[in-house]
Amino acid sequence: MMKIRRTLTWLLLAVWILGLSPPVNAASDVVFLSINNRWSTDTPIVSGGVVYVTVREFSEFNIYFSTYSTKNTLFMYNSEKELFFDLATGTSADSDGHPYAASLLYQNSMYYVSGQSVSEFFGLEYSRINSDPAPIVRIKAPGTVLSDSDFAMAASNSLNRKYTEYLAATTEAEVTAENSSPTPDSGGTVGVSSAPAESETPAPEPIQVYMYFHGISEAETPDVLNQLSKYGCQATFFVTEADVCENPDLIRRVYGEGHTLGIACASELSAEYEATSAALFAAARIKTVLVALSADDPDLAEEAAALGLIVTDREDTDLSALELASGGSSAHVGISSASSLATLFRSTKIQNYSMLAVTETAV
């Protein structure tokens, strides 16, 4: 009897010790992010106990960002508040210059900001859900339909799937790093393969496609921006004073997502430019000297030059002609709608296009 009790004691002790041991391949620092009721495609970074999320996550809440390289500053804003980050130090301050608790990191070619402090600054709700197999950080607008407990329950299967995919990707990256590391040969020097490299056909020169849109609207522009974000492309939007005054939030989103804004002018160049320029500054604190003229008028072009404005090339290339363009050439493509943009992205030659925005230095 004593022997059985002793055996049971040892078994219980072994189970307890195993329970304390972390599972193999556990990713203790991984946190998954939910924006309102959906998963984010980006994985947050945990540093010093602080969870950092990509700055672009906040566009879901009409909070946008822009960088000013000359001032070494990143600027987050909505229609009511502004938050400034010093890119050199990662520290932040509000629009009155008062220091704030939010901080910034730059990793993986992206800017990350401290999720909780930025959420609190802009009046969003931030929570951490301790779920299995990994915790969830949730940023949501007040009044979001699902509570944290309901979301965690509804998302349990997808969370397990995301965790499995994360572990697989992490393992693959580690194996790739190991395989790419140089190994010493028998002489103690780094081994170099003597196999000759296969000759490769050089890739054709890309066709430079400068994309721009005339005007913005709630009916078309959000879909356009979603497509541009999906394909990682930048474009230029030429707007009028009415466009800006009727859609200030949309103007801020366009600019915050890294696109270029220009001014569309008709016959009264000076007056139209001044009015639209003032409206742009009031809406998004930006200035531009890029203009598009509604007609190929030499007098208007001369007036623009005298005012120090830069006129874009209005020689449009339609989508069918673009299909025939040769490598190394360039084309200015005015997109009229979200469906036209989708047609461009479905082109069989899309891999040969270098998508660019019209800017002051590339018109």
Image (spheres, helix red, strand yellow):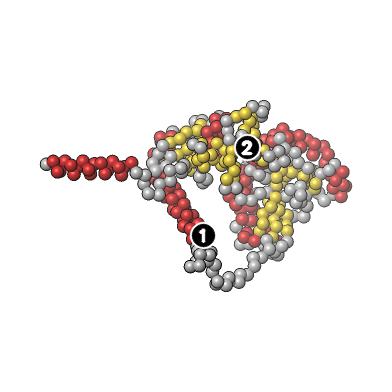
* Nearest to the observer: residue 68 or residue 245: 68
Amino acid type indicated by mark 1: Ser
Q: Which of marks 1 and 2 is nearer the N terminus?
A: 2
* Nearest to the observer: residue 169 or residue 141: 169
The residue positioned farthest toward the front in the image shown: 187
Say whether residue 251 is visible.
no
Residue identifier under label 1: 181
Q: Residue 115: x percent and y percent? A: 53, 36
**Left or right of 125 in this view: 6:** left
Residue identifier under label 2: 89
SS at circle 2: loop
Up/down of 278 relative to 355, above or below: above
**Left or right of 303 in this view: 145:** left
Say whether residue 309 is visible.
yes
Q: Residue 341: x percent and y percent? A: 64, 52
Q: How crowded is mark 1: few (under 14 residues within 10 Å), some or many (20 or more)?
A: few
Q: Residue 247: x percent and y percent? A: 67, 37
The residue positioned 73% from the left and 35% from the top of the image is: 281
- Determine whether label 1 and label 2 are within 8 Å by CB: no
SS at circle 1: loop
Q: Residue 151: x percent and y percent? A: 43, 38
The residue positioned 30% from the left and 44% from the top of the image is: 18
The residue positioned 54% from the left and 30% from the top of the image is: 120
Q: Residues within 10 Å of mark 2 (few under 14, many from 20)?
A: few
The residue positioned 80% from the left and 48% from the top of the image is: 311
Up/down of 193 relative to 33, above or below: below
Q: Examine the image and state in which quarter residue 22 appears.
A: top left
Amino acid type indicated by mark 2: Thr
